[in-house]
Image (cartoon, rainbow, N blue to C red):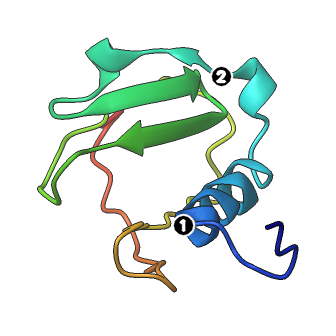
Amino acid sequence: MIRPSDTPPGYAMFRHLRDFFETTQYWLLEPADALVSEGYCLATPGKQYVVFQNTAQPFRLTVSDGDLDIVCTAWHNEQLLPAGRNDTISMKGNQ
C-alpha cells in the first residue's frame, strides 16, 4: 500500500541539512580538515567555512585573510530538531 501523506523516517533531518547547505555556496567548498583542530572542515578559504563534529566540543579554526567582515555561526544538532543556536566567535589573529 502506498500512503503519500506519510513522512519517511529521517526526512526532517535531511530537510534541515539541505536547508543549511542552501545558505552556503557548497559547490565552492573543498575539504580542508587541516584548518580545524577537531572534526572536519569544508572551506572556500577567506570566504566561508563549514565545520562538522560528531560531538559538541571546542575547536580551533584557522582562517586565511579575506572578507570575514560578518561572522555568523550556526550550531546544528540533527538529533534535537528544531536545532540551531547562533553564537558569536572570538577571533585572535587568523584563528
**Residue 57: which quarter of the image?**
bottom left
Q: Name the quarter where the N terminus is drawn.
A: bottom right
> For the residue marked with disc 2, what is the amino acid?
Leu
> Foreground: 68 or 10?
10
Question: Where in the figure is residue 84, as x and y percent of width and height?
Answer: 48, 78
How far apart, in angstroms, are the residues tagged by discs 1 and 2?
29 Å
Question: Which residue is nearer to you in this view: 91 or 48?
Answer: 48
Q: Nearer the viewer, mark 1 or mark 2?
A: 1
Task: Spot the residue most to the right.
Answer: 4
Q: Position of residue 63 (x, y in %)?
A: 43, 29
Of the residues under marks 1 and 2, which one precedes in the sequence?
1
Residue 62 visible in the current orientation: no
The disc labelled 1 sits on which kind of residue?
Pro
Judge whether residue 83 can be spotted in this image: yes
Vertical relation: 65 (above or below) 83:
above
Any mark on residue 29, and which?
2
Relative placement, left or right, of 72 versus 52 is right
Q: Which residue is mark 1?
A: 9
Residue 80 percent across, percent down from the top left: 36, 80
| Residue sitting at x 61%, y 57% | 14
Q: Are marks 1 and 2 in contact (CB under 8 Å)?
A: no
In the rendered image, residue 62, in percent from the top left (x then y), is placed at 33, 29
Residues packed near mark 2 inside 10 Å, few (<14), some (14 to 19) or many (20 plus)? some
Q: Quadrant of residue 9?
A: bottom right
Q: Residue at 17% across / 60% down in the picture? A: 56
